């Protein structure tokens, strides 16, 4: 494809995307295909000779679109939002075109410098203490591919530091033996990526009970630490969640921070979804205690109108992170290595996309106020949905509706709510996913689309309540 054809096809693609976004309502939210459907529609081998663009786009419509779950659809209420916006798409397009692989400052200075600048901007927007910002010198932020990677690198950093300290005291003990004693903590409602980080890092990860507000409390952590110390284990890491996946509950960061500081263990804050809302001053009380954290992460690609991937991780001590992750062959070194930032030492991959560009486009296009407006609107709409559910005595709401997520169930056995969700999802008018809160099976209703409005809530409530009526009626007959 030459530049002229690229201009033509590029314009067509922009039109295709704009049409998709503006007409998305007319589609079914989830596809009606069975596993393996695509192999019946496309050839089993790659074409020997290049094909015409028209044929490729024809297959997009015939084969790909029928298998797409429309995450940007106004009736998609599953998981958490998948961030999206036109400025972000355009920023990513430019990043793809530049094709820089910004593993070091020298590999592309603007990649490294814009990333540190926008991470400082956003760190300031969410009210992070100055120690977490690049401008201060000791801490700083970096873009990771996901919140899962963020918690993993946090854990690796804590593990490295702990083993190093232990080796100073116990030089003759084998690393493997020390590793077998390490134990980390999170709540039972922490995302599965925390457990996975423990698996990859080869350390025990204890999942602790939450209180009646689905929150991990300081005394529960402290008791677990003391118990483990008595058993000869070495507590080294805790992950607090701000905004759990199941119900958007909040661990008591101030209490956990106190315990972590007193016990000298590393505290990571996973705020994958809820961290976005910290750009609104009225939510900043939720981060009280963050001054005792070693790292914090949230995904702008969830709720800040930035497309996947763009997970932001801030650390208080860059040294702790980079000493755990630095391997420095000659071919990657450069003459400014002493004073410039090389972000390959801040994460797992060497190669890094220029993700800061889309974030910068979004921040500049919407401004802080524009981004706050959308978050507040989602929270208002979640309250509206909560009021609808609470107004119907067949239902109950579980957990507090603090942000854009409402968790509810039909009063009665879990099987009833399970059936309700299946009927709704099979109908294809709405899409939601379940979670377990203690022994309760609940349906999660998440505000997802950028332009969510009152009519979407009214529609969703109509589908939920009328499906419940059908289900309960059938049960009686
Ligand atoms: N942490 C929380 C609280 C989440 O809700 C999620 C995903 O929704 C994750 C971590 C994992 O995020 P990622 O897909 O970026 O790894």
Image (spheres, helix red, strand yellow):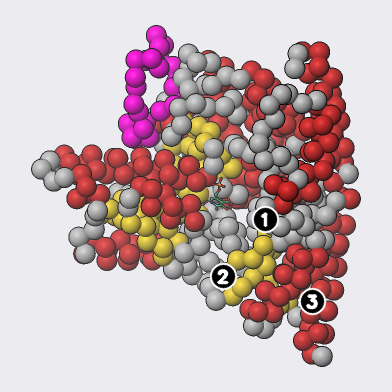
Q: Position of residue 351 (x, y in %)?
A: 49, 26
Q: Residue at x 40, y 11 (%)?
A: 334
Q: Residue at x 24, y 58 (%)?
A: 233
> Looking at the image, which is closer to me, 299 or 265?
299
Q: Which mark is on residue 437?
A: 2
Name the residue: 71% across, 57% down: 34
| Secondary structure beneath label 1 | loop
Front label number (2 vs 1):
1
Q: Quadrant of the N terminus?
A: top right
Specify start and end residues of the magenta stretch as a single range. 320-345
Q: CA distance from mark 2 to mark 1?
A: 30 Å
Q: Position of residue 232 (x, y in %)?
A: 20, 60
Q: Does residue 137 appear to the left or right of 15 in the view shown?
A: left
* Residue 319 in sight: no
Label at residue 35: 1
Tell me the CA gap for discs 1 and 3: 29 Å
Q: Which residue is rendered at x = 57% and y = 19% of the image?
A: 100
- Quadrant for the C terminus in the image: bottom right
Mark 3 or 2, closer to the camera: 3
Q: Which residue is mark 3?
A: 468
């Amino acid at each position: 494809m030459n530049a002229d054809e690229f201009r033509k096809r590029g314009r067509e693609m922009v039109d295709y995307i704009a049409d998709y976004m503006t007409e998305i309502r007319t589609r079914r939210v989830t596809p009606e295909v069975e596993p393996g459907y695509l192999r019946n529609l496309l050839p089993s081998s790659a074409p020997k000779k290049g094909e015409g663009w028209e044929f490729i786009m024809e297959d997009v419509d015939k084969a790909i679109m029928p298998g797409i779950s429309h995450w940007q659809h106004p009736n998609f209420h599953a998981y958490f939002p998948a961030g999206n916006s036109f400025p972000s798409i355009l920023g990513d397009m430019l990043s793809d075109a530049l094709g820089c692989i910004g593993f070091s400052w020298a590999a592309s200075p603007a990649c490294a410098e814009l990333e540190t600048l926008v991470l400082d901007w956003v760190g300031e927007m969410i009210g992070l203490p100055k120690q977490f910002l690049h401008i201060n010198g000791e801490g700083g932020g970096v873009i990771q591919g996901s919140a899962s990677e963020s918690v993993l690198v946090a854990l690796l950093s804590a593990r490295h530091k702990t083993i190093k300290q232990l080796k100073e005291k116990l030089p003759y003990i084998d690393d493997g033996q020390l590793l077998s004693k390490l134990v980390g903590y999170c709540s039972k409602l922490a995302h599965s990526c925390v457990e996975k980080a423990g698996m990859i890092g080869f350390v025990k990860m204890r999942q602790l009970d939450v209180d009646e507000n689905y929150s991990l409390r300081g005394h529960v952590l402290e008791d677990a630490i003391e118990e483990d110390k008595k058993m000869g284990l070495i507590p080294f890491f805790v992950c607090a969640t701000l905004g759990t996946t199941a119900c958007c509950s909040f661990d008591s960061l101030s209490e956990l921070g106190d315990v972590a500081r007193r016990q000298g263990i590393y505290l990571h804050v996973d705020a994958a979804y809820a961290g976005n809302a910290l750009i609104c001053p009225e939510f900043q009380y939720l981060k009280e205690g963050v001054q005792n954290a070693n790292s914090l992460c949230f995904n702008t690609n969830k709720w800040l109108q930035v497309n996947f991937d763009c997970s932001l991780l801030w650390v208080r001590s860059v040294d702790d992170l980079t000493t755990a992750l630095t391997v420095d062959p000659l071919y990657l070194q450069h003459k400014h290595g002493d004073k410039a930032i090389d972000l390959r030492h801040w994460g797992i991959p060497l190669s890094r996309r220029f993700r800061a560009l889309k974030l910068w486009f979004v921040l500049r296009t919407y401004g802080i106020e524009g981004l706050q407006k959308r978050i507040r609107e989602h929270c208002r709409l979640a309250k509206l949905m909560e009021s609808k559910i609470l107004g119907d005595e067949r239902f109950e709401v579980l957990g507090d509706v603090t942000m854009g997520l409402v968790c509810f169930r039909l009063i009665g056995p879990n099987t009833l709510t399970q059936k309700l969700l299946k009927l709704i999802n099979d109908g294809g008018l709405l899409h939601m996913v379940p979670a377990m809160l203690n022994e309760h099976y609940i349906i999660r209703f998440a505000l997802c689309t950028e332009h969510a409005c009152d009519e979407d809530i009214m529609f969703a409530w109509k589908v939920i309540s009328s499906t419940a009526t059908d289900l309960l009626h059938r049960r009686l007959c």
